[in-house]
Structure formats: structure tokens, C-alpha cells
Image (cartoon, coloured by chain):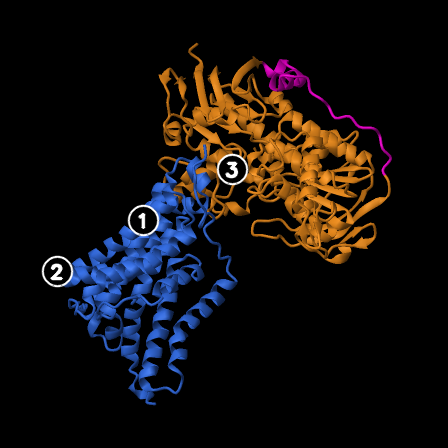
Chain colours: A orange, B blue
Amino acid sequence: MSDVLLRLAGLTKAYPGVVANSAVRFDIRAGEIHALLGENGAGKSTLVKTIYGLVQPDSGTMILRGQPYAPGEPRAARAAGVAMVFQHFSLFDALDVAENIALGMENPPPLRELAARISAVSEAYGLPLAPRRIVGDLSAGERQRVEIIRCLLQDPRLLIMDEPTSVLTPQEVDILFQTLRKLCAEGVSIFYISHKLEEIRALCQHATILRLGRVVGTCDPRETSARAMAEMMVGASLHVPSRPAVEAGAAVLRLNGLSAPPPRAFGTALRDITLDIRAGEVLGIGGVAGNGQDELLLALSGEVRVEDAMLRLRDLPIGRKGPNARRKLGLLTAPEERMGHAAAPEMSLTENALLSGAGREGLTRHGFLRWRRARDFATRIITRFDVRTPGPDNTARSLSGGNLQKFVIGREILQHPDVLVVNQPTWGVDAAAAAAIRQALLDLAAGGAAVVVVSQDLDELMEIADRFAALNDGRLSEPRPTRGLTVEEIGLMLGGSHDMEAAHEAA
Amino acid sequence: MDLSAINPVLLLASLMVAATPIILAAIGELVVERAGVLNLGVEGMMITGAVCGFVAGVASGSPLLGFVAAALGGAAVSLLFGFLTQFLLSDQVPTGLALTLFCLGLSALIGQSYIGVKGPEVADIHIPLLADIPWLGPILFQHDAMVYVGLALVGAVWWFLHRSRAGLVLRAVGENHDAAHALGYHVVRVRLVAIMFGGACAGLGGGYLSLVRVPQWTEGMTAGIGWIALAIVVFASWRPGRVVMGAYLFGGVTVLQLNLQAAGVPVRVEYLSMAPYLATILVLVLLSRNRSARAPGALGRVFHASR
């Protein structure tokens, strides 16, 4: 047992109303890549925060290299050789790479010396990075490199990676895996949190599966099928969305050379996007985060106006029309950010139903609100989409992420759109709710509507989309039929020419 | 009208005096905002410093003790703001406004029996050799100590923000408090210290008004200088060097218009009094127009360490 690096013994952490971790126990061995699997809300985040000293457990102990380990704050964890790469990067946009790295170190050398060390480490691990660049200008992959190098400069014994690949292209993922394997060969243990099963099968030697705060199983992912692991995570057999084959109809929405400047600092410009979206099809748009997804959605919803001829809905130019005019014509959108963009958090579900449904559902008359109809509409959404809430008078904030997502997607679907554009429809939603949302989107398309799904979850797009296109730096690739598309082809569509590949060869 | 009565050397020399309270208040607020806190109570903290400094100065006869009291007074009321915004998580904008209103009343109460009283004498320092240079000497090197303290403070703040680790942490906290918290920095602690520094600086600026610039106590004597300091911080794009420039511009136009009033220029006095405010804001707006002037990312946002 001398090769155990970190032993967790009976870790329990409860929050009001929910037990995040319940008597969690397992070992992480020295020099292994250990996966932690679980659905959203399974308690993964709480567990890694406990190991990193951000959360104190209610009971239970940890032993690191034979010594009792109870970090009171991240500083103590770092001093003990535990480093962490965050899921949502903990970086400072306005500061440069070296300053960001200095902030994550206990005793950083002077900046000039640090810059030299950054260059050395980034070369050694094939992660090119210029120390003086401002972080706000970096791509998602580069930003992750900043975090990884920040960790590596402290010679960690245990590196925690929380969903590291969610923002990377397949090629970037390959590079990351090579780096991780190299580290692992040097004796560093890696604790790898993800719900992407194929990745875990390719990378990890050991997996612990968490469900509702408890360890429900362990396995060797190299010898366990993805389906078996998924079923351990969910605790039930998975429902795969089904769909009838549909002949795609005529083009409903045409994008003709759609271009737009970035709407904010550090945003992406849309460049010359031309695309036909046909009735009855589901068009999947993939891409690494920050390549124009949000901007495309803003241009389609009408929050950002473009030239009139760039967008045509059934031959009617709509580029200069605002969101309400487009809704009236049948183009509906559901943005990614649920709280504050798709829904007003402090308003009731009835009011939120009113906000987008007022026009198409006739919820106003002569400028006055028709509360009863609005309430009925909200109730219909709640029943039809199985939104778990006591009733339509509850605030949007009181719903869990998955339930609110069902509500905001359902709200648009029930308005019978001709074209529905959704961004990240199942982001942060548990597997059962995700399957329900995907099925609803497929049903909508089967009913003759055109559906555009923007998502970073490639598996999701492969599952429901008829055609697939990728956004890269504001440009959209030629859409291709999903059937028969290989991972390599998708990767090339997503990445285009990326400096990762050059680094790969150099390393 | 007699423009020849305006002595350019005297004009430039008094410009430095007129700019000093603004420099002091603005450099303090700059640090506060760089830490991500928007304290609109600068005017209030200044007037508190003005009255505390004057009372202590009169009571002790020592301008030094007066300035110490001014800084402490400003810091004390800023701590009230800090407690409300950092611990009770109140919104920073109305809290800062309330602080100003509260301090205007408080200072009037404290200073009631000091109206018309004469304050202690503050000596000018004649820097040896340099002060004897013709023209430059009287303009630059024959002022009271606080003029130089203000300038030194600007340099120190620049060095602190851009060259020291603590300054880097402060900027990080102001840029993204969630990330700073995740890395294990104490967001609230950093902000409280910054708020107190800002309060002390504003207090010094107020003390300079009542002990040197005017020098006596009258109600509401700050007359909007705290607000100008706030505006200068924003239009200076949160950079210390530009703060000095903005303050000198404001001080310069103030002194110039006073001189023009005295010389009897045939322009309505009200227009002349507006001039410094208009000119400063206009120039700084034009300057900050094309630069990528970005506010600290977390400016004004309430931080709550989520579970």
C-alpha cells in the first residue's frame, strides 16, 4: 500500500437540503490517472474542492503520502503538492500570462525570471505560450495551457483536472493527453474529472463513479464499456432519442454572407456565413467555445442587427428586424445562458412565459396583460415538459438548471416556431432531462420546423443532427451530413489550422 | 479688465496647490476601484477629513496632527462603507451616495463651533538650492509638504500596483473576484484594506482644503471636489499618471478662472466657475476615447463566496 498517494476516508459534506458527499472513500495511487465520473449534481465538484481546500468536510479524513491532510485553504493544498486546473478557468482577462501564473504560485520569482521558466516548461511539455500576452486575447485551449503551466511550475504530486476537455478540439485533446501521460510517467498522479466516457477509457487506469454523493462503483475503464459506465453513473438504462427519417423540405431560413463585428471586447466577429436551413431538418453547429457561437445566436435572434439581405426568412429580408418582429414571423431562439438571458431569475414562470410568448400566444390585448392566459401557457409548458416545480408562480431562480432549461426550451417549442435556434440546449442538464429535451427538438423537426442546435457536445450533435457544420473564428464550415462523419473529420472541421498541431510536431 | 495683473509664476505655483486635494482623493479612489469596489462616498470622506483635520489642528496647534486626524477620520467613515458593502453585501452605488449625504451632515455637526476659527499655520518648505532657481523655484520647490506627499503617493501607488506582489493580488481581486477566491486570496480582506486606504487619502485631501488651501472650516467646503476626483479616476482609465494630469488640468483651470474673475474679464462669473469642470471632463473624455480603457472587471459587483 506504499504507492497510495492520497487516501480519502469517509468524506461527508452536507449543505442545507442536500448531501453533496456521503462517506466517500477511495485511494489515488502514485503515478496513475484516476477518473472521477458522475452526472451533474453527483458531488464531483464538492469532492475536488474538498481536496483542494476550498471546502471543509463535515466529517472524514484524508491522508496524503502517509501524512494526515486537511487543507484549510488552497494555499495549504498547493504547499502539500496538490494543484488544480479549473473547469471554468480561474484566469484574469486583463492581466498577462506571467502575471496570471504568478498569482497561482506561493513564492513566484521576479516576473522576468518567471517568464523564462514559463517558456522552458511550455517547451518541455509541448504547450507553447508567450508570457507577455494578455490572457483576454487567448483562445480557450491557450487559456487552459496557462492553467496547466501554472500548476506544473509548482512541481505538483497530484494534479486535479476538472472537465478539462469541454472547451478543446479533438486535436487539442490529443495534445493534452500526451502531456498528461508524460506527467504520469514522471510519477505525478492525475485526478481526472469528466463525464466524457470515451476519453476516460482512452486515458485513465482507474475510475471511481459517484452518484448522489456516494461512491457507487469502481472499474478499470480500459476494460469496461462506455455504456456500462454510463449506466453506473445514471443508475438506470439510458433512453436514446428516437427519430423517424424525414425528407428535408425547402429552405426556410437563408444566411447570405452574414457578417458582424464583435459585439463586445474579447468577442468574435462573424465572417461571411452562408447557409440554408431547411424545413424538417436538425442542423447541428459545433465548435470550440468562443468561436462565434454566442455571436451567431445574437445575430439570429435579432439582438445584434445585421444588413437586411444577410438574413432571409422565407425570402423576406429580416436582418434589420428586432427580436419581437422575428418572433412574430416564426423565428424563435433560446440562448445559452438560462439565468438572466433566457429567463429573468427573479420573475415568476408566468411572467417569464409572457416575456417571450406575449406576441405569438396572444397574451396581451391593447397593451394590457392577460394574466389568465399567460398562466395557462406557463402551466402547459410545465406539464408538457415535466418541469419540476410547485407551480407557475414560482420564480425562475428557484428551479434547478435542468428544470429551467426544460422550461425555456419548452416555452419556445410550444409557440410552434417555423425556425428554432437553440444554443447549448442540454448544458448542465442531467442525462434524463437532456434526453427529454433532445426528443422534443426531434419531434419539433419531425413536425416540419427547422431546428438549429448550437452545441459544444459533439456526441449530442451526432445523435440528433441531420447535418453538421462547425464554427471556427467566426467562420462556418460547409455543412455535411452527419451520417458517416468520422471523429477525425469533425476535428478538422472544428480546428481548421491550429497552432496546436505545430506544437505537437515540435514536441 | 487688466490681464497684466496675472502673474504666470504665481498662477502655476497655485495650480500645484489647487490640484493637491484632488490628487490625494483620486489616487485613493483609484486603488479602491482597482480592487473592484466603487465607492461614491469620496466627497463625504473628504469633508469628514476636512473637519477632523481642522478640529485636531486647532486643538493641538500642529498641522501634522491635523493631517493624521484627517486621514483617520476619512478611513473611519470608509470603514462604515466597507462594513455595509463587504459584510452586509449592500449595493455599492446607493451605499456610497448615502455615505456622502451622511458625512455632509456629520461634518456640519462636528464643525459647528469651528466656523470662523483660524487654523494652525502650515509652513512652506524651501527646498535648498532648487527653490532659488528663477521661475522654476517658486513654481515647483516652494510648497508645503503635502504637495510633495501627494505626488510621492502617486508614484508609490504606481509602483505598488505594477511592481509588487500585493498590488498584483489587488488588481486580480478587482478583475475577477471569483477566480481570486478560487486561488485562495482573501477578497474581502483585500477590499477592506483598499477601502480604508481610499478613505484615508480622501481624508487627507479634505484636510488639505481646511488646513492649507482655504484655510478655515465652512460647511460643505469640499464643493464637489470629491465628485471631480471620482470622474478623474474613470476618465484617467484607472492609471495613476493620468490622474495627476487630470488633477493639474482641473487645478490649472480653477486657478486661471479665479485670476480672470479678479482681473474683471467680461464673462459671467457663473460661466467662469463652470470652466474647470467642463474643461477637465472634456479633455479626459477625449483622451480616453480611443484607448482600450477597460474598467476593472469586477468593479461594483457584490462578492459573495458561494458554497
Closer to the camera: disc 1 or disc 2?
1
Residue type beneath disc 2: Ser
Q: Are marks 3 and 1 in contact (CB under 8 Å)?
A: no
Q: Are marks 3 and 2 in contact (CB under 8 Å)?
A: no
Mark number, residue B80? 1
Query: What distance separates the C-alpha of mark 3 from that of mark 2?
Result: 55 Å
Q: In this rendering, does residue B63 appear at all?
A: no
Using the rendered image, report if marks 1 and 2 lie on a common chain: yes
Mark 3 lies on residue: A89
Where residue B272 sits, quadrant-wise, is: bottom left
Q: Is residue A407 left or right of residue A46?
A: right
- Quadrant for the C terminus of chain A, please: top right
Q: Which residues are magenta?
A: A220-248
Q: Residue B46: where, in percent of width, then height?
A: 30, 60
On screen, residue A193 above or below A367: above
The 10 Å Cα crowd at callout 3, few under 14, some 14 to 19, many 20 or more, is some
The 10 Å Cα crowd at callout 1, few under 14, some 14 to 19, many 20 or more, is some
Q: In this rendering, does residue A259 appear at all?
A: yes
- Of all chains, the one bearing label 1 is B
Label 2: element kind: helix
Residue type beneath disc 1: Leu
What residue is drawn where x is 36% and y is 56%? Answer: B41
- Of all chains, the one bearing label 3 is A
